[in-house]
Image (tube, rainbow, N blue to C red):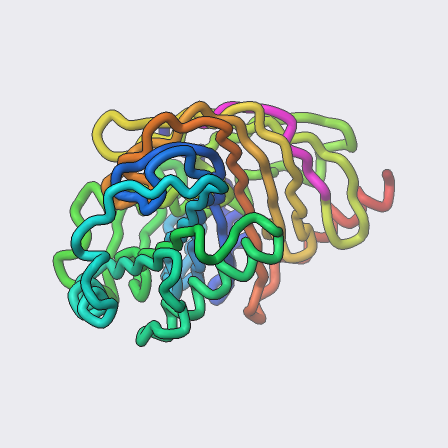
Amino acid sequence: TRPEKVEAKTLQSYYPKGRKLQSEAYLQVEGTGSNEEWFLKTNARFLYNYRVTVETVVEQNDGTVLVFQQRFPEVVQERASWDSTVRVGRIPPLVRAPFEALEREVLKRFPVYVLIRGGIRIASLIDPQAERLLTGLRDRLKAAGLVDEEKMELAFQIEKLQGTTLRLRYVSGLGVTQVEILQGLEGMFSDTDLHRIAHGSSLLMDYFIAPDLANHMEGEEWEVDASDVASLINLYDAEVSGKLELRLDGRDDRETTLRIVGGQVVARGEGRQSVTLKDPSGTVQYDHRNLFVRDAEAQWEADTFFESERHLLFGTKRVANLQMKTVYRARRVDDAKPASDVKEAVADDSSAL
């Protein structure tokens, strides 16, 4: 469905030329399952992270047509798998080769995929990003008392969006109508890729999450289209649909607290693969002085996770005990300020509560 048409004055208030937002989004999936390609044959516990860092700048805004530039400094997947019983299955021949050869063969490809199995020192990695990412993931797991370094497998993959800069043209009432690749590998993105990126960019999320915030009272609930706030869910390689139910929980002179109280989201990946995220719970911190979502966290229930050959969970069977969490953080890093009448209306409303 098309997004609603937004009044020109409101669009220019929320998205003035020069507005710059830096954001990070995390998708975390934890559960149990088996995978023929994993070091641990059965009864493996896995933790999967998908992380996207984005810098979004408003280049133009005439009240109807907006032009955004989006840069993706870091887009990575991480996976850890471990098992207290450590039942070791078939190890692919490539892993038995000297690690220097593994690096040489794997790191020259794109997207980059690096695998660390028990007993191989992370510090021996040549690639500094691989060492940083995998050391961080290992340390987080060990600090939580979850794993023994000799009984786990770590992997990470750099996605093709990393290092890419896009220009997106957004028309009020229509959505994204054009995507231009300014920086990135030539021929890397198919038309389907660009469609998903456009769909998942949710460029006007900071408006659509609470379009009439000044007139919402504490305890009031409303629905938003999941596609309009897809950045909160962080599924850039899928299309999302459905609804989220929000409630205004509180407000001070700077921020409004929203609570995610219900809804259901369907994420569709390649082909017919899809997953339904349901029974969400979480909070959203909205900076109503600068008109953007500063912080959001949510937990979800799901029966499975949609398959994609690009996911580090691809081929995982008998998935169970699935827990999903999404985290979003953002900050304004520009001098462009929202129109005073918008932020003052929200501030005046908060003082009356």
State yes or no: residue 127 in magenta: no
Segment tinted magenta in the rendering: 257-265
Nearer to the camera, 158 or 52? 158
Point 55% across, 47% down: residue: 327
Q: Say which quarter of the image contains residue 89.
A: top left
Farthest-out residue, left? 187
Looking at the rendered image, the quarter that the C terminus falls into is top right
Nearer to the camera, 281 or 241? 281
Magenta part mainly helix, strand or loop? strand
Point 31% across, 57% down: residue: 115
Left or right: 89, with 226 as reference point:
left
- Whether residue 230 appears in this view of the structure is no
- Whether residue 276 appears in this view of the structure is yes
Left or right: 270, with 343 as reference point:
left
Residue 236 in the image: above or below residue 12: above
Point 32% across, 56% down: residue: 157
Left or right: 94, with 115 as reference point:
left
How far across and down, in percent of the image, does residue 179 sit? 26, 52
Farthest-out residue, right? 352
How far across and down, in percent of the image, does residue 257 sit? 72, 42
Residue 270 in the image: above or below residue 310: above
State yes or no: residue 264 in magenta: yes
Q: Say which quarter of the image contains residue 249.
A: top right
Count the marks.
0
Looking at the rendered image, the quarter that the N terminus falls into is top left
Residue 58 in the image: above or below residue 334: above
Nearer to the camera, 186 or 138? 138
Point 44% across, 45% down: residue: 82
How far across and down, in percent of the image, does residue 261 sit? 65, 27
